[in-house]
Amino acid sequence: MPDANFDNSETHTGPSATLLNNIRLFSRYAPPLRDTGFAVLGAAVLPAFLCFVVWQLSPAYDANSLKGAVVRSLAYSIPILFFAMVLSKILRAGGAAENHFGWSPILCDGLLKTINKLILFCVPLKFLYTALESFDGGVYHESLGRLCFIASMMLLAIGLWETGNSINRWRDSAHVKDQAARVDLKLLLYDYGVDIQIAHRQGRHSCLCRDR
């Protein structure tokens, strides 16, 4: 007869109990690890393609040439793009941050606004002004390069401002929920105190009846 309590680790000792505990631990952390892994893999597609482009253009020893400026600029931009795309995948609606880490949708949406601006505008502009630093001796860096840098910083500042507003809304909603929870706790304690008083009075009444 097989043991009916096979799923209970308390009935097992030694390697079998360790194996069951490891299975339960992995089952607990498997969904967030899986979704985070998928987010990393999905975010790595475009950076991997750009790394392939850099590999095809290498070696580019002369940074003043167009090829050298592109390779140098991509080498600086790819890590930022990859990190931003990973955060974008994790913070999106229904992503790992909401489903597994318990982050508020308001907070995730606010952070995602800055991340999206970083991906769509700031990283391409960084690629441009980094390439202009070395291309043709930096002849365009003082004019067009500075404009790209200023535009990138302005867009990043707008994204951070929107994120700050979202964080304030999230804090306000969390404060409201905390106040509501405190009111519910006070009402619960009040009802509990009333029930105790009623039970105490009923007990005294029954004692008086028995004494009579």
Image: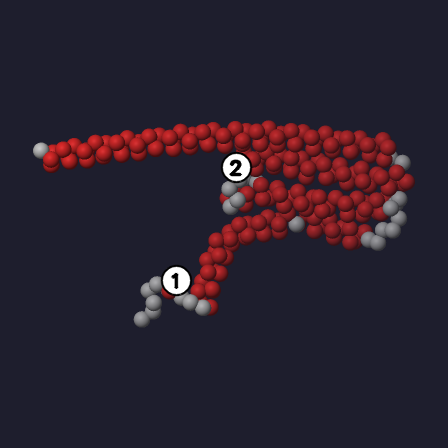
Q: Name the residue under label 1.
A: 10
**Which image quarter holds the N terminus?**
bottom left
Residue extending furthest left?
212
Label 2: state its secondary structure. Answer: loop
Name the front one of labels 2 and 1: 1
Answer with left or right where residue 181 lies relative to residue 2: right
Q: Position of residue 201 (x, y in %)?
A: 21, 31
User: Which residue: 40% across, 29% down?
Assistant: 183
Closer to the camera in the image, 4 or 38:
4
Distance from disc 2 to disc 1, alpha carbons, whole Å, reads: 37 Å
Dot 2 or dot 1, earlier in sequence: 1
Q: What residue type is labelled 1?
A: Glu
User: Which residue: 80% across, 30% down?
Assistant: 147
User: Which residue: 63% across, 45% down?
Assistant: 86
Count of numbered badges drawn on the protein: 2
Residue extending furthest front?
211
Closer to the camera in the image, 51 or 160:
160
Answer with left or right where residue 7 lies relative to residue 92: left
Query: Which class describes the residues within 10 Å of circle 1: few (<14), some (14-19), or many (20+)?
Result: few
Q: Where is residue 51 in the image (x, y as percent from the top left)?
A: 74, 51
Q: In this view, does 17 lie above or below 37?
A: below
Q: Where is residue 83 in the image (x, y as percent from the top left)?
A: 67, 45
Answer with left or right where residue 162 lies relative to residue 50: left
The dot on residue 104 is 2
The dot on residue 20 is none
**Which image quarter holds the C terminus?**
top left
Q: Which amino acid does label 2 sit on?
A: Ser
